Image (spheres, coloured by chain):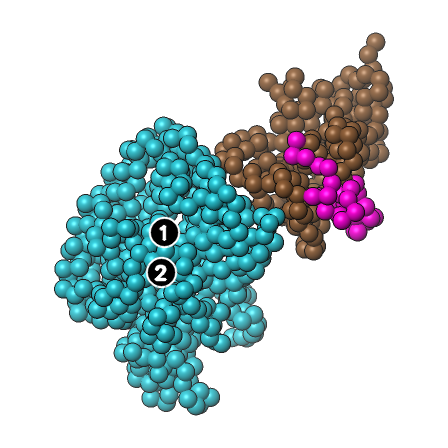
Chain colours: A brown, B cyan
Amino acid sequence: MSKTITIDGKVIPFEEGQTIMDAAMAAGVYIPHLCHQPEFTPHGSCKLCTVKVNGRNCSACTFPAADGQDVLNHTEELIEDRKKITQMLFVEGNHFCPSCEKTGNCQLQAVAYHLNMLDNHFPLFYPDREVDASHDEVMVDHNRCIFCTLCVRASHEKDGKDVFAISGRGIHKHLIVNAESGLLKDTDVAATDQAAHICPTGAILIKRTGYQVPIGQRIYDHQQIDQVSLATEHPKHGE
Amino acid sequence: MYEHLETAENRDSLKRVVVDPVSRVEGHGKVTLLLDENNKVQQARLHIVEFRGFERFIQGRPYWELPVLVQRLCGICPVSHHLAAAKAIDQLVGIDPENLPVSADKLRRLLHFGQVLQSHALHFFHLSSPDLLFGFESDISKRSVIAVLGEYPDIGVQGVKLRKYGQEVIRMVSGKRVHGTGAIAGGMNKSLSKAERDYLLQDIDQMIAWAAGSVALIKKVHCTNLPYYDEFATLRTNYLSLIKPDGALELYHGGIRAKNERGETIMDQVDYCKYNDYIHEEVRSWTYMKFPYLLSLGQENGWYRVGPLARVNNCDYIDTPLAEAARVEFKAHSGEAMVHSTLAYHWTRLIEVLHCAESIKELLNDPDIMGSDLVAQGEKRYEGIGVIEAPRGTLFHHYQVDENDIVTKANLIVSTTSNNMAMNESVRQVAAEYLSGRELTEPLLNNLEVAIRAYDPCLSCATHAVGKMPLQLELVDAEGKLIDKLVKHSDGQIERDNA
């Protein structure tokens, strides 16, 4: 007999070794997330996928599913918490959607829309961060980094390169690259690397390609992030 | 001229009258008058009290962001900034205007015609028609587009729909009515589909008819108020605009032509990339807006006017038939080589609306706008200059980038900046001729705003607004009696008025 959990009262089967996120996505249930991509080792850092498991807050992307778990996902309280987390991500960096080339294709923006985030709520930090455009093809705009580590994992797990890492703690946390100069041009990153394309925001970009996709043809122009996420991360639910 | 009214002597002993904010213009500005004991005007200034930061904060950004970032200067004519920046970054990827793919060039022109049409329609119908239809000193309740819609519903509705049409052209080409994308370095990111083309074609004949009607309307308004309309705020000035190689009116790309008040050529077909050799800017302490002038004529005499009046004055002809006929009629009215009436800005603005509508029809019937060859690429350069005729006049964007594609330097000369001296001079003229010595009333002060409004200034474009709208907060009890009032002035100062 297969094992099951319930998410918001819906009975969902899972296989041994799956996380709550895995089980939910396989069943076509969207749990908001930014730092998670099924093809990489879960990291549990963005906390957007926080769900209540038997009354306790847990990150769905790292918490193993276990038989009989009662999971709450789409509740007013959790949506409100996720909205606050998203607002904090916005104010910590410099996210200016109106002119950002990632707008319409940005997961941070899309998740904010999904959560009905209408303002920043918190005061903006306006941190002083650099743009590293030293590499001929790839650039890093540190203003938009949310420390999801997807680039770190993609570079390590898929590209076999270790171009990116996170350094510092707390508010001093920042993305670094694997070069003594600290510049991207002195790393072995390439525009074909998965790490150069994985960024959910506009922090890592392929140079000179901005705005080439017209408005109306961008990823989130006609679909919300939940539809896109289920369709692209678990295609069988995309129809 | 009235330069002596720029700075009065004995300023402390004079009475101060302030028009703040100047209404029905884009952005925030104020006019100050200093009067002596006989109400004679001793000083009159148009102040632009806002700070503009774009030239600074685009430094450090990659160049391909420029058309999308810099267009945020303005919500009325973002397309002008979008295209001026795009022309500049074309050069950064080694593409000069003649090498832009034909489809991309025509799509940009279509986008620009839509923009000029909507901006001019907005200005004439929404902002200025109340003055022109009801009189400059009419009751304040009449001075809005709502009153126009009430008393002249046909004119009001045509204005709204003409503007809407222009916005729809913009939406079809750039994806959004305001702040779309569209132009990218070396071309455009999409062409028009047949469905989009057909959607725009269905209303274009109506737009041309309404545009022609609006030209007839302004001609009638102008000519029934002579000689007042020819004299009010009128200045004999130099004029500057882009021009086609054959001397036709041009809005998207051409050489610089400047003429003096007698219609004699100061310069012609000058490559705008050399603008720095011909135009300099002067800074004055009392305003955030600079004063550009033609180097060859010097600071004193080198200032010039830009915009519809300059363009129609400067061109030899207009290459669409109805607008050309309207231009011929307009020039015949004055009998002079150049028309100097400041209120003739309205007339020429509507001639341009007609020209835009005719040109849009021409382009919509051109299969190139549905073409697929949209982007060209050349050899990287480190400096790009884009100049365009924005609705309000010649607009200069000038950028330098480093080897990493990052903007290191930017200079923008915005249309309204070029009209700065003229607007101040017009304000001084109106103050001296129409206000001086009279008991000042609110309707009388509207004359000053009418003079400024004729130029259709975009003060936020020229300075970049940071939000200093004056605010009034009133606490009223259940009987409707005012019990407390707080007034926030545009300088941020807060005052309590316990009336």
Q: Which residues are magenta?
A: A165-192
Which x, y percent locates residue B407?
57, 53
Q: Residue at x 53, y 65 (%)?
A: B51
Query: Residue lying furthest front in this view?
Result: B379
Task: Give the residue type at disc 1.
Answer: Ser
The answer to whether residue B69 is visible is no
Question: Which label is found at residue B119?
Answer: 1
Q: Is residue A175 part of the magenta span, yes or no?
A: yes
Q: Sequence-wise, which precedes: disc 2 or disc 1?
A: 1
- The answer to whether residue B120 is left or right of residue B57 is left
Task: Give the residue type at disc 2.
Answer: Asp
**Residue assigned mark 2:** B456
Which x, y percent locates residue B225?
18, 65
Which chain does tag 1 point to?
Answer: B
Front position in the image: B498 or B332: B332
Which chain does tag 2 point to?
Answer: B
